[in-house]
Amino acid sequence: MAFDSTRPLGFATRAIHHGYNPADNANALTPPLHLSSTFAFPTAEEGGALFAGETEGHVYSRISNPTVALLESRIADLEGAEAGLCTGSGMGAISATMWTLLKPGDEIITDQTLYGCTFAFMRDGLSRFGITITHVDVRDPENLRGAISDKTRIVYFESPANPNMRLVDIRAVSSIAHEHDTLVVVDNTYASPMLTRPLTLGADFVLHSATKYLGGHGDLVAGAVCGRADAIHEIRMVGVKDMTGSVMAPFNAMLVMRGLKTLQLRMARHCESGMKVAEWLEAQPGVSVVHYPGLVSHPQHELAKRQMDGFGGMVAFELEGGYEAGLAMMNRLRLIRRAVSLGDAETLIQHPASMTHSTYSPDERRAHGISEGLVRLSVGLEDVTDLIEDLAGALGTNDR
Ligand code: 3LM
């Protein structure tokens, strides 16, 4: 029998159990992996009814799949959404959502700072089809008031933003956007639903690169979008089925479900170690600035305390020696891996200007607050003393 609690279940419990009852699946503790690409119709008429949307069920795995559907319902539950949809990558979730919601003539307002490929998708992809992109610094929500118009269909941002850790007040921005009947789409990759739940703060859609904290082990590429059931159905039937074909493989859904089981545990450790590394870095000579929402020196620390249930594992910093010093320091690391991506067990370091944000021109980076010397750390799950020792060696603050 399914467990029936009189009070809402906790985050970790839901991340492990939501939507699955072993009794429905030969008592298998672990949900089955349905690899089937297609599903047999009992009769031709029933197949027709499924296609007509008169009955519910699986037809073909580019539309839906039972293993992926379980993950979709779990992520939606953790985000406090009516429905979820999983995709082949984070960019798949972003593009399928945008192609579904926007039409020529519409405008999208985004924050200044976006992940490099999201920025390029908007600049080179959406703009080709008659959609206007306007970048506004929505760290001050009032800036949105001056920019928003009848044409603005979507306000889009990340919080914390990749790579400079700027935050957006989701509640304030959503309330201004809704005065203008504009949809709010939040990329919640950095925080994960454990630290921020944008829909409960007023956003309309929440997106993820599930490659990162949701998967958590650096062994898959995946994405997700959550929101109201009717809108998610439309993104599934238009943005995924017909426009991008960006489908999550059932095996990847299994892996993300495995990752979700430890999301709370992992995130708690990311937060603890992220804070220690950020505080340590801030105290080092030669480190000119550390961007981490848990630091009192972060200009939006008060917002972070209000909006986030922890400050996460992403830390960005700059050295006094700028670009060259940053790269030289990266090359001296012995344990921390030089790699893009984030949210893995392994601590990763990368240089946004030449890597994740090389899609921006130098002028665009300057205008969008992404400095050339910035270095980005995804603090992993190793012993934090080992990480700090490696950083100390690379910064030349110990005798190695
Ligand atoms: C990275 N980021 O290293 P996928 N939204 C955010 C992201 O950080 C990312 C995506 C969407 C990185 C990937 S860079 C070549 C490697 C906030 C990805 C896109 O399509 O699952 O990679 O998600 O910052």
Image (cartoon, grey):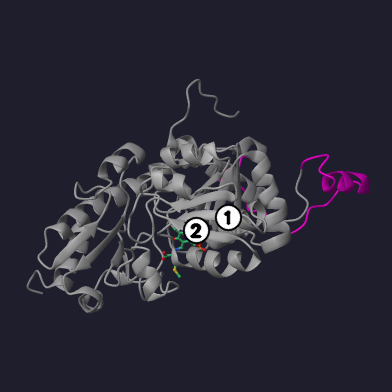
Q: Residue at x 46, y 52 (%)?
A: 157
Of 147 and 53, which appears nearest the observer?
A: 147
Question: Predominant secondary structure in magenta?
Answer: loop
Q: Do we see residue 307 in this rendering?
A: yes
Vertical relation: 236 (above or below) 342: above
Of 29 and 183, which appears nearest the observer?
A: 183
Q: Do the residues labelled 2 and 1 touch (CB within 8 Å)?
A: yes
Q: Quadrant of the N terminus?
A: top right
From the top left corner, tell me how far across and down residue 39 is, in percent.
Answer: 79, 53
From the top left corner, tell me how far across and down residue 230 is, in percent.
Answer: 68, 40
Which numbered disc covers residue 107? Answer: 1
Q: Which residue is drawn at 41% across and 65% down?
A: 341
46 sits to left or right of 15:
right
What is the number of callouts on the image? 2
From the top left corner, tell me how far across and down residue 45 is, in percent.
Answer: 92, 45
Of 108 and 224, which appears nearest the observer?
A: 108
Which residues, given as a range, are shown in magenta? 27-56
Which numbered disc covers residue 134? Answer: 2
Secondary structure under tag 2 reads strand
Is 45 inside the magenta-drawn segment? yes
Instruction: Tell me the kind of residue under disc 1.
Output: Glu
